[in-house]
Amino acid sequence: MAGALVTSNDAADSVPDWPLAYGKIVPPLVGGIRYEYTHRVLAGVVAILTLVLAIWLARTDKRRSTRRLGWTALALVVAQALLGGFRVLEGHAALSATAHAILAHIFFITVVSLSLFTSLWWQFDVPPLDDSASPRVSTLAAWTTAAIFVQLILGAAFRHGAFGITPHIVGAGVVTVMVVWAGRAAKKRFARVPAIRSSVIWLHATFGTQILLGIAAYWAIVASRGETQPGLTYVILSVAHVLVGALALAASALLTLVCFRLTRPGTEDVLVPVGVDAPVGRGGQSVDPAQSGVATR
């Protein structure tokens, strides 16, 4: 969100040096410097928190995959900082700023995934649900996440002047089809699974809001042509569009992970849980289906 405020306020080149700002730790907070400097401070806070997270996971989490993902998040935030410095010192906004935005989304869904992997819900055993249809819901959700990610790349490239808006509009159509397809399949096959149902709700809510904000942001772009400075309406709508786009990506990634966690390739018997959200096992021990609210048909 802070990065979007920099771009929407045309403040990307307000500070010419890095890592200092005009040779100081705290520069004069005037004009576009306010947005750029705030962005840097928040980036530093995120980097410190990610370092703490990575060390914490390394010391307390017994799963090698989770520990590695923590260090991956740290590597991503360091790379993001260096890429931001390259953008300031070397320019090439169409390439470097777009790459900076893309890496931010990768880091974001990495941390979102970690929040799910470290939750108690993820660490409890649950009976797998058979998904006998083709393509599987988990596959559809993964394709949807990939489509949203590509759409965010197209949006970032448009915002930073790499090319026009047409690819972004076409991408919006593709993403709409994927979101509807994945959501309908998930609700049709697993309507009684709370974790999947709630993930679909979040995806549809964020994506629906994103479509409306996209239309409003495009209107604001057209209305502000010829103005010397970005207006408040344009700034609010464009920043909100970027923010909700990231939330839609996170919602789709969570749906993908939840589906991979709960489903497996289908057989003749399909498990339909009454309440998968409730823990059904501890320490790797299974719970009898009759006691865990899972019925077999």
Image: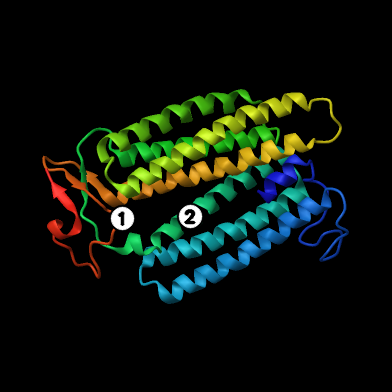
Residue 182 falls left or right of residue 235: left
Q: Nearer the viewer, mark 1 or mark 2?
A: 1
Q: Tell me the number on the disc at residue 277.
A: 1
Q: Is residue 118 left or right of residue 100?
A: left
User: Which of the 4 quarters of the picture holds residue 74?
Assistant: bottom right
Label placed on residue 182: none
Q: Name the disc covering residue 112, or none.
A: 2
Nearest the viewer among 169 and 21 is 169
Work out whether 174 lies above or below 261.
above
Task: Tell which of 135 and 181 is nearer to you.
Answer: 181
Report which quarter residue 123 is drawn in. bottom left
Q: Position of residue 160 (x, y in %)?
A: 70, 36
Q: Residue at x 33, y 39 (%)?
A: 139
Q: Quadrant of residue 120?
A: bottom left
Q: Residue at horizontal 44%, vertical 55%?
A: 113
* Image x and y of residue 92, in percent: 73, 41
**Which quadrant of the rendered structure holds the C terminus?**
top left
178 vs 134, left or right, is: right
Residue 177: image location, x then y, percent: 43, 27
For disc 1, the neighbor class at 10 Å (few under 14, some 14 to 19, many from 20) is some
Amino acid bearing label 2: Val
Type of amino acid under label 1:
Asp
**Cα distance between the residues tagged 1 and 2:** 19 Å
